[in-house]
Amino acid sequence: MNKYLCGVDIGGTKCAIALVDQKGNMLDKISTCAHVDRGEDEMIKFIADQIKILFKRNNLQQSDVEGIGIGCAGHIRFKDGVIITTSNLKGFKNYPLRATMQQYFEIPVIVDNDANAQAFGDFMFGAGKGYNDMVFLTISTGIGAGLVLNKKMYRGVTGTAGEFGHTIVEAHSDLSCSCGNKGCLMAHACGMALPYLFQKKLNEGKKTKLRMPSNFDVSKISGQYLKKGLEMDDPLSKEIISDSAYYVGLGIYNIFQTLNPPLVVLGGGLTNWGDFYLDKIKATFYELARDMIFDPMEIVISKIGADAGVIGAAALTLE
């Protein structure tokens, strides 16, 4: 009998734990916010307890499960299962996540960056099925990527390969990234940048159809808020989305020149901007690549959807 897979997606505000079959179908899931504001060891024990609850309510023994895959944002030293640093969890600097979780289980525990987990999930169960090589680019609060080369995850010497969000796309930019550099792709195209970009456009005298009361907090501008603007043909929202898409297209062009993959899969919350966004990304890429494309390269949206993080984490147990 094929064993089940367990995935854990640890975020700064939400943690998802799921049981998945070997075809990528989710059987059961626990979502919780109760892991937040706990100490490091206490948080991991809490998550371990939730995993055991999930096993129990599905009448599973540990021996019925292949392993536990954990996806976590930040820099992960994969070979050691250590979080080097993460921006969305308090503490956890040089934290031995795999070893700490492993003490609660007899089955293998695998820990990786959340973008790598999503990449492998899409490779196994989604848009990447049938390919030997692909790049997964997640565009959400931040921007990350996972690289599948010759059917294997490529992580680099430390485990941090694929940080395309920190590639510099505008050398003389005044936009600062969370890494401290200016002009990174993340600074121009991710969710964290949207409030700054919105305020910048307002300061330039751009008009918006969106309702903005006098006490409106621009820091609350999100991808979902701009999607409402897109749906009502708001020129300011469309300009920000178009600018963001341009820089993503530029980033994909750099990926194309570096790796020459047959497939780039886009995931993350900002892909909900839809065809307006995707068409601009593709147009930018093809305008830059021109006649340097000798074999087709597909740019598609992830097929796994909102549960890509936890399904991808479960997929790590099959690597």
Image (cartoon, rainbow, N blue to C red):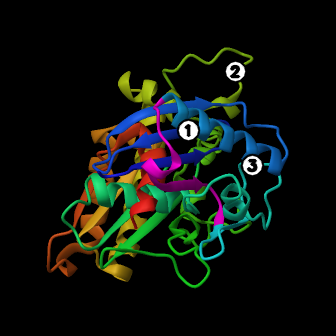
Whole-angstrom CA distance, mark 2 to mark 1, is 32 Å
Helix, strand or loop under label 1 = strand
Contact? badges 1 and 3 (CB < 8 Å): no
Q: Which mark is residue 16?
A: 1
The first of marks 2 and 1 along the sequence is 1
Q: Is residue 182 visible?
A: yes
Q: Which mark is residue 89?
A: 3
| Tag in front: 3 or 2 | 3
Q: Residue furthest left?
A: 295
- Quarter holding the C terminus is bottom left
Residue of label 2: 216
Q: Is residue 293 above or below residue 106?
A: below
* Circle 2 crowding by C-alpha within 10 Å: few under 14, some 14–19, many from 20: few
Q: Is residue 156 left or right of residue 229?
A: right
> Residue sitting at 54 percent across and 62 percent down?
185
Q: Is residue 186 left or right of residue 209?
A: right
